[in-house]
Amino acid sequence: MLLITCPYCEETLPEAEFAYAGQAHVIRPENPSGQSDEQWEEFLFIRENPKGPHFERWRHLHGCGRFFNAVRDTVSDKFLTTYRAGAPRPDLASLGGDAK
Amino acid sequence: MSGNRVAGKGRVDVGKSVRFTFDGKPFVGLKGDTVSSALLANGVHLMGRSFKYHRPRGPVAAGSEEPNALIGTRRGPGRFEPNTRATVQEIWQGLETTSQNKYPSLKWDIGAVNDAAYMLFSAGFYYKTFMWPKSFWHRVYEPFIRAAAGLGVSPTEEDPDTYASRFLHCDVLVVGAGPAGLAAARAAAVDGLKVVLVDENAEVGGSLLSEPQALVDGQRAWDWLAAEVEALKAAGVRIMTRTTAIGYYHQNMIGMVERLTDHLSDLPADTPRERMWRVRAKRVVLAQGALEKPLVFHGNDCPGVMLAGSAQTYLNRYGVLVGQRPVILTSHDSAWFAAFDLADAGAQVQAIVDTRESVRDDLLAEAGKRGIRLKIGHTATATKGRLRVTSLRVNPVTDGKVGAGYVIGCDAVLMSGGWTPSLHLFSHTRGSLAWDEDLTTFLPKDTPENCVIAGASRGLWGVEAVLNDGADKGRAVAADLGGTGGETACSVASDRTGTGVSHTELPTDLNPGKAKAFVDYQNDVTAKDLRLAVREGMRSIEHVKRYTTNGMATDQGKMSNINGLNIAADALGKKQPQVGLTTFRPPYTPTSFGAFAGYHRGAHFEVTRKTRIDGWAEENGAVFEPVGQWRRAWHFPKPGEDMDTAVRRECVATRQSVGIFDASTLGKIEVVGPDAVEFMNRMYTNPWTKLAPGRCRYGLLCGDDGFIRDDGVIGRLTTDRFHVTTTTGGAARVLNMMEDYLQTEWPDLNVWLTSTTEQWATIALNGPKAAALLAPLVEGVDLTDEAFPHMSCVECTVAGMPARLFRVSFTGEIGFEVNVPAPRGRTLWEVLWEAGRQYDICAYGTETMHVLRAEKGYIIVGQDTDGTVTPKDAGLDWAVGKSKPDFVGKRGMARPDLTSEGRKQLVGLLTEDHSRLEEGAQIVFDPTQALPMTMVGHVTSSYHSDAVGRPIALALVEGGHGRMGETVHIPMPDRTIAAKITPMVFVDPDNARLKI
Ligand SMILES: [Zn+2]
């Protein structure tokens, strides 16, 4: 079972308290109706599938209830970092991850 | 004492005899014996039949790696377990054991014809033999495979035992309490570090239990061990025996199963049989030791052929001579010591056969002292004996040429092909391995986990070497955690260091094509099978493994993987690392379902959510159905009523007078804040700005893909407060979705979301008399169409309780939903029930609710929709606020596929023959078309309707909205049913009945 650090609770807790919530930094456009079909398809369906660091969202479902972001290496299954929703993407190089 | 028990040897209690049975025959062993050691003491080697060929088999090992000696164990009714290792199961007074895979008896087994039909069962036999003809599959092949497959017999009764589950957090977990593990634990237990030492055996000591001759710092091994255990306890180390570390999971979580009662004659009260530990350790030291390799030669599976190290264990730990006239067959020095121990204990060692050309002088001298015949530079080519080995055929090998064979009579063959580090848990960590050419084995390299590996499991040999390595590792781990480990280096005299060589099959002068030289005993895989697999094109060990099933039995190839790899690599002409090693996976040894299930069985398997009114329903004969985790009253049959009759009565009573329904399970979310209305506008398809406080509206929730997710009536209590209801099953999902948008897309909105599902008990009253019943109990509002019209809500007092009252209808009748604080739900129900007697009030369940709503064409999200239905498809276009600039799903609904012609749309169906359709049945336009027919939709809801006078159905049909009045067809196994497409509303389309 993974251990995950909630950036709001600032505690490292077992995976069972959390729920995965898909890829991070997929921003819902300001004016969806102004989006072309291709743009909307991209927003709805097209996702990364990296071998290596993956920016993803988790929710501390059985804790504070907050959504937050994480960088998890899909090869080692290790969390490189977690950070609050709305915070900028962390620099992969500073995390020791293999940026691809 | 029996003839095979050696006085003064072993750690068993000679004063305490223990009676048990094997295949119904009584036996006597000693306290401390395993089933295997006790049977061997009684001269019994034959303990089972093999899985595929039903060949007679005896124990080949003395520990948990045992592939052959699998037995059933029984402790009275309900307590039967198959596939128990006889080498692990401790005996207790009254234990009943049985052998497996035999019929009618272990000594004469009819399944052994498989052995004669050997060629049929060679590598890939499933793939080749059972391919043709097709019709033979279910009549001939499958029954045969089913009868032949599987080990042992499953228990048939419910397990009466309980199983526990616990968490444990520690600084250092040491897996394996042999010399390396003991030393590691001792060195790490400093500065208050919390250390746990775990071992699968009944007592700690590991290989020291089999090597009493060693002198550790001048002390005899077992004295040193006893003192060490005391020292560990004094240092605060938690020692857990009979506890198997079954798996190494992410971030140093180790699963362990502790066996608490399987070794006891009398079960203590209130004690679980097993306990699953989930251990989170800051550091882990793996000291799992090494496993001895069998040698691969014709007849190496005959009962009496076993590992030399195991024979040494049976002698030193249990005081049992596994043979009076053993032959030693080895390619490693270690077996020589076993020979010496057995000879010193009185065995007539017939010979030491060593495959190597030369052997250390000191070993030769020791053998000479004991007068043991030596066969250096020899191979073994066959055994004789059916139920017990009677001789071994050996041949000299000169310059690779096998000379003439001759026979050595014996009653046991003790073999050693060298030792393999046990890397199971290390492998679970996804640790990488490095091939060691000298040791012909894989050694641990890197691991992503915080773990170190110590002792024989990293290829070290000899008590002194592993003790000091364990201490080094313990010290390093302690230092890592800020501790300062002391000096613990020790010296060991009478240490048995040694080396050896590795073989594939032993060379032979006989036809290798006819050799039954087993590599995997449990799955009956021979060296020939492996070579055949390579000849037939298998290149990777993963393919060879699956084609031959080598290493795929319950022992996961603890003994067979490395020999299998060496043979496959040889056949391919490649080095072992190029062929690869299969990955070990948890659990390390077979683990009971009970241990995994723990407390989660029976009623505790999953929570059952009950409303506050559930008790009333139960007392009044309700039949329940599960809805999500809730148990809901399904219908309330009166004596003698079946479900259909009860539901029809409930429907009629509600439409004629008044029905009462427990709607407490409806999801409820309180949306509050200055931006609440803006939030609702963005989340739901409907417009909310103009909804006045005190009014409510049917709300529809879509995803950004434009498909329906949920629905429910939403009341605006004040300008900044909405009482949102959701479907029963969707409550948590909807709240999660709302939180997601609120937290991450619209953090600027000032809104709070609170789940209030369990804060309120919700009772629905429906029917022409609903208002008349309720009005006298309500304070604060008149229940008239003028003061409180349909789709109103108000905070008021009902029967003296604070309440939120909604005038809504999911039945088409005048309807109210009364919400009161949950603890008062049953009181309100009983008040309403009493007040309703004069109107013949009728309690109805979810089935009647479904019928009544279907008669009105109200959909159930998840039943009439499936995640690909748009509001338009469902006929709910009217609920979409098209003039709003944006809401979740607006852009999605405009996607080309969602606006195209020919989508499946929800419609009503009436069958021509007045039969009731089956929910889920497929629909076609032309029933005469060729198979396979083009399916154009399916029935989503179907009920008998008294109000309509015939069965009604809802269905998704391609282009359904444009096909009113057309006939579609529903092909069923026995006939094809014709049905007419109708609007979805079957009852009171003008809503006249909603008026008070
Ligand atoms: Zn949190």
Image (cartoon, coloured by chain):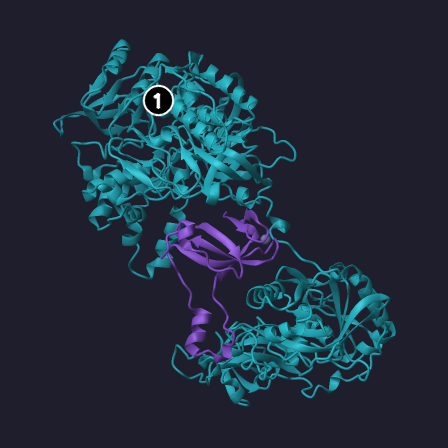
Chain colours: A purple, B cyan
Q: Closest to the observer: B239 or B850?
A: B239
Q: Residue at x 24, y 31 (%)?
A: B438
Q: Horizontal and vertical percent for residue B825?
A: 78, 63
Residue under label 1, please give it. B462
Q: Horizontal and vertical percent for residue B653?
A: 76, 76
Horizontal relation, residue B438 to residue B16: left or right: left
Amino acid type of the residue that numbered disc 1 sits on in the rendered structure: Gly
Q: Residue at x 66, y 83 (%)?
A: B949
Furthest toward the top, the residue is B369
Horizontal relation, residue B631 to residue B894: left or right: right
Residue B213 showing in the rendered view: yes
Residue B470 vertical placement versus B222 (above, below): below
Image label count: 1
Q: Closest to the observer: B430 or B891?
A: B891
Examine the image and state in which quarter residue B760 appears.
bottom right
Examine the image and state in which quarter residue B820 appears.
bottom right
